[in-house]
Image (cartoon, coloured by chain):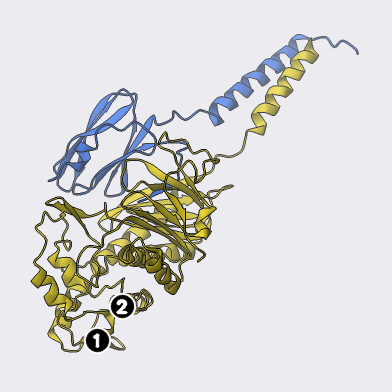
Amino acid sequence: MSQIKLNRGDAVIWLLAAILLVGLYAVFWRVDGHGAEAVVLVNGKRWARLDLFQDQNLDVPGPLGHSHIQVRDGRVRFVNSPCPNKLCIHTGWLSQGGEVAICLPNKVSLQILASDPRFDTINF
Amino acid sequence: MIKTFGYIFWAFLLVFLSACERKPVVYHEQLLVFGTVVDVKLWGVKETPGQQATARLADDFAYMHNAWHAWQPGPLGRVNQLLASGESFTMPPSILPLIQRSSKLSLSSNGLFNPAIGKLTAIWGFASDDPPKGPPPSAEAIRAILDQQPNMKDIRLNGLTMQSNNPALKLDFGAFAKGYAVDRAIEMLREMGINNAVINAGGDLRAIGRHGDRPWRVGIRHPRKAGILASVEVEGDESVFTSGDYERYFDWQGTRYDHIIDPRNGYPAQGLSSVTVFARQADLADAAATALFVAGPDEKNWLPIARAMGVTGVMLVDKDGQVQLTPSIRGRIYFIPPDGNTEENNTEQTSPGIHISTAL
């Protein structure tokens, strides 16, 4: 086998190729943080997309008033909502992909996004 | 040296590219319509057409909800008022296909699915947005309605003209309208060229096509505990509907009264926790789930009704957690042990209380 010498030009090409490869990997294979994002819907329309590792408090306007949503340490919950039975608040913290809390009276829903939940849909 | 470098490069490239399949695209939207959450998943549909499709679905669900609602004022409310008068009248056109289809299903269920018993549902307090608190209605009040035997045969149809001689008849499509609406929604998706989708309306669903290279994965919730009882894969075109005693009920002096009223005795049906029906048409699955829930856990009672309705895929869970399956479902369903693993090798032995019913 003949030994091929690596000159400067070759090295640059190889380096660029390697950078390109890593770059492509980063762009197309960015690992979706499992359950690291949530979506807030008002009246079925997307109102906000939340990064669960960015602590924040939100006031989401619905037909009855504002629903207060809190994001802390990768979890999210309804803190308050102007509905009679407070089912959305009793749902508590959501952190797992696919989990949902809904305030039907105020038409606000909250769902954790997941890249690969165990099921596409749940029958009950 | 360069050769080694080259090998490493190609090895990397191979590894990364071999996994470089395009991520399956699922357009996912939740609609707060039909008094519930309608979860729509469209496989292989991009953002813009997905939004357009779900916006049309939302409009249609809102229209159907208003037209067919059993206790809010609207077209069905007016029909019920006019039916009670005994006079003949012209119905809103949107009601006619519901009456025709549900009459047929009621007949094949031997009356166990009966949309004419709206008065019974109402005196039990289930014709309301809030769950009733009790007490149960008096035996006399139940008897007064039962004695008049309201059923779909009391309705006389002539084109869009209808009339009833039975003052106890009141239409309530609660055990049917959701299925019918899901069927219309699937029809609408197909007209728009969408052939891989799941529409899940408050837990009851119809799935068409596939989730890319695999079937749709459906989890069936446990009727007594938090979590999933079983999983099943669905592809092509199939509906999965469950009627359960946990959906709407009230407890009164130690007894649970659920929302599924037995038209034969006027009381909530006893004996089962849930019935899951697998069928192509969602309206059939919906009506059959109710009819089989009323029929109860004894195979001698529910099997003939399932046969008459043309339903072959059934899972029943009784009050003690005993499960009955029809053969067509047995090979497809995987029970999930309490620790939550979805191991495919778990069989009847590891899942307590599985009883396989006779051939259907």
* Badge 2 amino acid: Ile
Rendering coords of residue B130 (x, y %): 15, 54
Residue where numbered disc 2 is placed: B99
Residue A94 at x, y percent in the picture: 30, 33
Q: What's the chain of the residue with tag 2?
A: B
Q: Residue B162 carries which label?
A: 1
Q: Residues within 10 Å of mark 1 (few under 14, many from 20)?
A: some
Mark 1–mark 2 distance (CA, rounded to whole Å): 10 Å
Left or right, B223 with respect to B41, comes to: left
The front one of B222 and B287 is B222
Q: Which residue lies furthest to the right in this view?
A: A1
Q: What hue represents chain A?
A: blue
- Is disc 2 surrounded by few (<14), some (14 to 19) or many (20+) residues within 10 Å? some
B302 or A42, which lies in front?
Answer: B302
Q: Is residue A6 above or below residue B66?
A: above
**Are discs 1 and 2 less than 8 Å apart at CB?**
yes
